[in-house]
Amino acid sequence: MDQSSQSGLRFRGRVFLQGEVRAVTGLHIGGAAGALAIGGVDQPVVRNPLNDQPYLPGSSLRGKMRSLSEKFLGLPFNRQISGVRIHSCRTTDSYRACDLCQVFGVPGSERGQVDFGGPTRLLVRDIPLAPETVQQLDALETDLPYTEIKWEATIDRITSAAVPRQQERVPAGAVFAPLDLIYSVYETADVERFRLVLQALALVEDDYLGGQGSRGSGRVRFEKLTLAVRNRARYQQEARWDTSGDMRPADLLARWDTLKAWLSQQLPEA
């Protein structure tokens, strides 16, 4: 919901953050159990039905970024959605003081949201398997197309009986690309808030993505990051920031003062 006219905000431009996501360990982002008839895997991965290839849903990455950021910032988990507790501002004053809710948004169903909720800044697109990874996995004899089967077992603490289960994973080393994050800027404070996006990616690298992270799955690395800007005055002309080398979130955060100054120059007040 774009409410920039109601909130007094005016669109100034967008920041485009692109790159690759490398699975450092096997990666499981679950799909519907009934979607994979062949093999009868207990926990299948989500796949593109047009080519049967696994992909990273933008909602999974964005949700993990938000969840870790809420904990990092010490925000209260004051709202339930389908039984899950999250942070969501509920008043104009709290919303205006909360960088997280302005970057990631507040639910459209929130009471009073129409009065204080502005436009969500961050958009995260689905991420397909990189063509190079597709070629590599096509050449291998994997358990299922593009994936491996990891066997696990639950052990009865008294009888020591093992109950096996299967989990489908994208193998370690697989690359998903392009990573595509789009960040809209409406006011001067949004430039500083972009740091929250970079910090969230760094937090994901130190945590995990998908399921079974405490048992080794889901470690990822964001690589070959590039930055570009399109401002309102010349939206068809893209300005690119110098990101020579294999840039990762920590590298961009280390250069934040320089990057912030460049973003401010590229996205002047309308």
Image: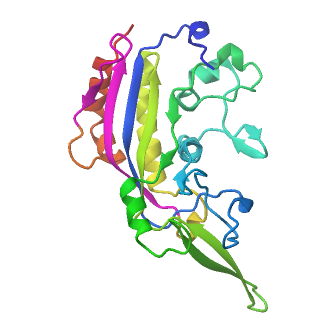
Q: Residue at x 44, y 46 (%)?
A: 201
- By secondary structure, the bulk of the magenta-drawn segment is best described as strand
Residue 119 position in % (x across, y down)? 57, 20
Task: Name above or below for residue 27 compared with residue 91.
Answer: below
Q: Quadrant of residue 15?
A: top left
Task: Name above or below for residue 176 compared with residue 269.
Answer: below
Task: Name above or below for residue 64 compared with residue 17.
Answer: below
Which range is magenta? Answer: 218-242
Residue 158 position in % (x across, y down)? 78, 89
Residue 174 position in % (x across, y down)? 42, 62
Of 197 and 232, the residue lying toward us: 232
Q: Residue at x 72, y 44 (%)?
A: 85
Task: Name above or below for residue 110 compared with residue 217.
Answer: above
Image quadrant occupied by the N terminus: top right
Q: Residue furthest front?
A: 50
Of 252 and 128, the residue lying toward us: 128
Q: Residue at x 45, y 36 (%)?
A: 181
Total marks shown come to 0
Of 166 and 80, the residue lying toward us: 166
Q: Residue furthest bottom?
A: 159
